[in-house]
Amino acid sequence: MLIKEIPLFQKMKEKDNLDYFPILLFGPNEGLIRENSLKLKKIFNTDNAEEIVFTGQLINEKPELLIDEIKTVSMFNNQKIIVIDNPIDKNVELFEEIFFTLPHNTLILLISSNLKKASKIRKFFEKSKTFFACANYEDDLKSISQQIQNLEKNIGKLLDRDIKSYLSQNLSSDRMISKHEIDKIYLLYYGNNATPKLEEVKLIFNDSADLGLNKISQLAFSGQPNKVSISLNKIFEEGVNPVAVVRTMLNYVQRIQFTQVALKKTNDFESAIKFLKPPVFWKDKDNFKLHCKKWPINETIINFNLLVDTELDCKSSYNLTNILCERALINIAVRGQNYFQ
């Protein structure tokens, strides 16, 4: 059964027995999936539940591990959470056998990226009258506006129209990335009498660009593989998802490509970037201009295809995401040395 997140949470809260239903969380918004999975675990977990994690590939190779785990009663916990990351279509036959006779106080969460309508996993959950499938799509203007309202509520201050407009244009469509930015604004203004100012908010976003994902994009396109590797390892240690890094790079490549096409029509850089949303931050403009003018457009297309393939590989090879992400960015940075010596 396809269900939205709010009704799903409500059904979890209204449970008056010990039998819980398997839930599939899927979609392109990995940050929202993480947020919703934590909410579901919090609603379910009233007794320090034991949590076990499997992957779809492992279950396909050794189905007995999942079967035994479901049947096994924990010696120390009354509740059990079983998480299945990246389930695959070959798992469906096993799920049909075991999901209808789950023991009491067992919650099964399946976590996946964007599943096509033809996916057997998605069909299995959507056609079921007992199990639930919750799609987690990328944040749109409505959901971003709700995040801004929540920020105002949490800091106890109203944001002026310019700040709201800036946040609407600059917050990511991935909940994980946007939450990181909002948390920094919260820390700046919570518990004091300071009035939120647009320039301060912009500096927060620029700080993220200097220290985080956008900075790595600039290093890669400037042909600095060593610095890319160091920066990647740092943000991986901080818990940043490699897929989020790849998506940030993809966004940067698309902006370069858009500008390169515009530059063919007009040789004026300012005119070429005029329609970019969000606009290029003034401190990044010089680097961005060099990237647009020095990289050949055919190489930009190669970078785009490389990153698209890398994102797909990351989603199908869950245990290799850090390696795949770093390999792609180093590839771009090494080739960038041809244009930045």
Image (cartoon, rainbow, N blue to C red):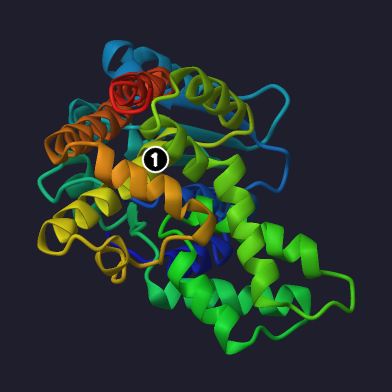
For the point 88% across and 71% down, which residue is it? 191
The residue positioned farthest toward the front in the image shown: 267
Label 1, on which residue?
Answer: 111
What residue lies at 79% left-to-right and 81% top-to-bottom?
195
Q: Quadrant of residue 250?
A: top left
Q: Quadrant of the C terminus?
A: top left
Q: Residue 51 in the image: x percent, y percent?
A: 59, 31
Q: Nearer the viewer, residue 135 or 203?
A: 203
Number of marks in the image? 1
The percent coordinates of residue 159 (x first, y second) are 66, 83
Image location of residue 94, percent across then percent down: 25, 27
Q: Nearer the viewer, residue 250 or 335?
A: 335
Residue 192 can be seen in this image: yes
- Amino acid at circle 1: Ile
Q: Is residue 250 above or below residue 40?
A: above
Visible in this render: residue 22?
no
Please give left or right for residue 268 compared with residue 178 in the image.
left
Q: Residue at x 18, y 26 (%)?
A: 90
Kindly state the secondary structure of the residue where label 1 is placed. strand
Residue at left 22%, top 45%?
A: 115
Q: Position of residue 255 (x, y in %)?
A: 29, 54
| Neighbour tally class for label 1: few under 14, some 14-19, many 20 plus, Cα within 10 Å | many
Left or right, residue 260 beside residue 163: left
The quadrant of the picture occupied by the N terminus is bottom left
Where residue 322 sits, quadrant-wise, is top left
Decide if residue 211 is on the left or right side of residue 312. right
